[in-house]
Image (cartoon, helix red, strand yellow):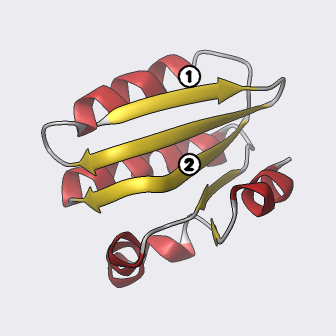
């Protein structure tokens, strides 16, 4: 999995490409933990390149949502492929993390 992070003053975007599973989830978790040590409070996941997510990947999203909430930040995700959106919907995570059709809409919502 590839993770590309772009940063603004109070906002970061994590663009994920490939598969988020038990093998790749620890890398994302590590990158997020480093991000949580920075002052930015708001986060958007660009999931346009995410082809697959497992329960291990969902756990990383849940942990991120809890940490963002505890620091009064905002979290969103954008451009979910149908199969990835289905996993978020079935698991109920779509209610925890707002999903947007475009990156621009997600950025506007979390600013």
Between 98 and 46, which is closer to the camera in this rendering?
46
Note whether 93 is above or below 36 in the view shown.
below
Kindly identify which residue carries mark 2: 45
Taking 3 as reference, is 108 left or right? Answer: right
Residue 3: x, y in percent? 42, 31
Q: Residue at x 42, y 51 (%)?
A: 61
Which residue is painted at 13% across and 37% down in the image? 23
Q: How many marks?
A: 2
Circle 1 sits on which residue? 35
Q: Position of residue 51 (x, y in %)?
A: 31, 59
Q: Residue at x 50, y 29 (%)?
A: 4
Indicate the quadrant containing the N terminus: top left, top right, bottom left or bottom right.
Answer: top left
Measure the C-alpha gap from mark 2 to mark 1.
Answer: 13 Å
Residue 101, relative to residue 52: is it above or below?
below
Viewed as shown, does residue 109 lie left or right of 47? right
For numbered disc 1, what is the local secondary structure?
helix
Which label's residue is closer to the chain start, 2 or 1?
A: 1
User: Residue 103, image x and y in percent?
Assistant: 70, 56
The image quarter containing residue 63 is top left
> Between 8 and 49, which is closer to the camera in this rendering?
49
Element carrying mark 2: strand
Q: Quadrant of residue 96?
A: bottom right
Viewed as shown, does residue 30 lie left or right of 6?
Answer: left
């Amino acid at each position: 999995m590839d993770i590309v992070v772009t940063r603004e003053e109070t906002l970061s975007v994590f663009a994920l490409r490939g598969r988020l599973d038990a093998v790749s989830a620890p890398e994302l978790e590590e990158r997020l933990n480093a991000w949580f040590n920075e002052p930015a409070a708001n986060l958007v996941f660009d999931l346009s390149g995410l082809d697959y997510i497992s329960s291990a990947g969902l756990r990383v999203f849940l942990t991120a949502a809890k940490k963002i909430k505890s620091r009064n930040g905002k979290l969103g995700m954008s451009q979910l492929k149908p199969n990835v959106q289905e996993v978020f919907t079935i698991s109920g995570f779509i209610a925890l993390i707002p999903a947007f059709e475009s990156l621009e809409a997600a950025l506007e919502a979390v600013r």
